[in-house]
Image (tube, rainbow, N blue to C red):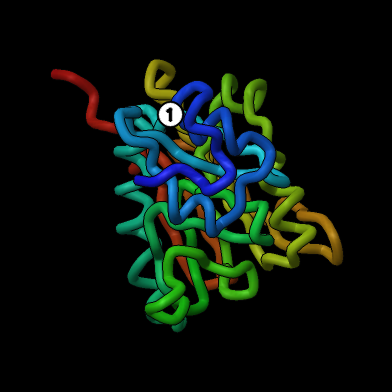
């Protein structure tokens, strides 16, 4: 992997996390990400600032897989597609990687690394008390500003045997909560496509 033409080889070795700080774009991301030698992480970007975070916890990963299997059939029946992690691009200098994403359609094959916001129906984000404190990107605000019709938020607390799913719908320029349910009750919606399930299904089996 070559360093940029402006890098002075007499200086410290090229480090994209340092040398490209504040200037990241989708083009640079395609050229330099993932960073060789780094653990597998999520790469998101806010106005040229690259934000690196670890992948979801094992409990969230399990729940995401279960939820994707729940949402995929009704989404496809309605003409949409349920995807795992994708790059939702707001601009060349701003993108996020939701846990799951329901898209209206896939991008063209030659540009399918980046999903433009007008093709996104509903990002699905898994949250936790720590992520709410530490998250440096207000994803609902970004998605609402981009006029993405729906946003789903999921919280799984394995130690408390607790799970909750919330659906938000766009109201002009912000989201309003339109459905919520916790473990032991039914999460039921008709839009953006009909689905009904108990959020308890997202919890991993308890040890015997």
- At a point 45% along the width and 39% down the height, the residue shown is 42
Lateral position of residue 110 relative to residue 142, left or right: left
In percent of width and height, residue 156 lies at 45, 31
In which quadrant of the rendered view does residue 208 lie? top left
Taking 81 as reference, is 125 above or below it? above
In which quadrant of the rendered view does residue 119 lie? bottom right
- At a point 45% along the width and 42% down the height, the residue shown is 3
In which quadrant of the rendered view does residue 81 lie? bottom left
Taking 89 as reference, is 36 above or below it? above
- At a point 40% along the width and 65% down the height, the residue shown is 82
> Quick one: label 1, few (<14), some, or many (20+) residues within 10 Å?
few
Lateral position of residue 168 relative to residue 172, left or right: left
Q: Nearer the viewer, residue 162 or 12?
A: 12
Q: Specify whether residue 58 is in view.
A: no
In percent of width and height, residue 71 lies at 40, 62
Residue that mark 1 sits on: 54
Lateral position of residue 35 relative to residue 129, left or right: left
Secondary structure found at label 1:
strand
Q: Nearer the viewer, residue 48 or 106?
A: 48
In percent of width and height, residue 109 lies at 38, 79
């Amino acid at each position: 992997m070559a360093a940029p033409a402006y890098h002075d080889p007499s200086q410290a070795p090229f480090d994209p996390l340092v040398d490209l700080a504040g200037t990241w774009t989708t083009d640079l991301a395609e050229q330099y990400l993932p960073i060789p030698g780094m653990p597998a992480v999520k790469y998101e970007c806010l106005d040229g600032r690259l934000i690196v975070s670890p992948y979801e916890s094992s409990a969230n990963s399990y729940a995401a897989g279960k939820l994707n299997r729940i949402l995929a059939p009704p989404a496809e029946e309605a003409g949409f597609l349920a995807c795992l992690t994708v790059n939702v691009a707001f601009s060349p200098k701003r993108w996020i990687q939701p846990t799951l994403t329901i898209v209206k359609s896939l991008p063209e094959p030659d540009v399918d690394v980046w999903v433009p916001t007008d093709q996104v129906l509903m990002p699905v984000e898994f949250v936790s008390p720590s992520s709410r404190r530490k998250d440096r990107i207000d994803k609902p605000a970004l998605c609402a500003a981009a006029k993405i019709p729906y946003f789903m938020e999921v919280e799984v607390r394995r130690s408390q045997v607790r799970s909750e799913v919330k659906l938000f719908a766009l109201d002009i320029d912000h989201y309003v909560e339109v459905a919520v349910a916790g473990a032991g009750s039914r999460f039921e919606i008709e839009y953006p496509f009909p689905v009904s399930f108990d959020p308890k299904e997202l919890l991993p089996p308890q040890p015997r």
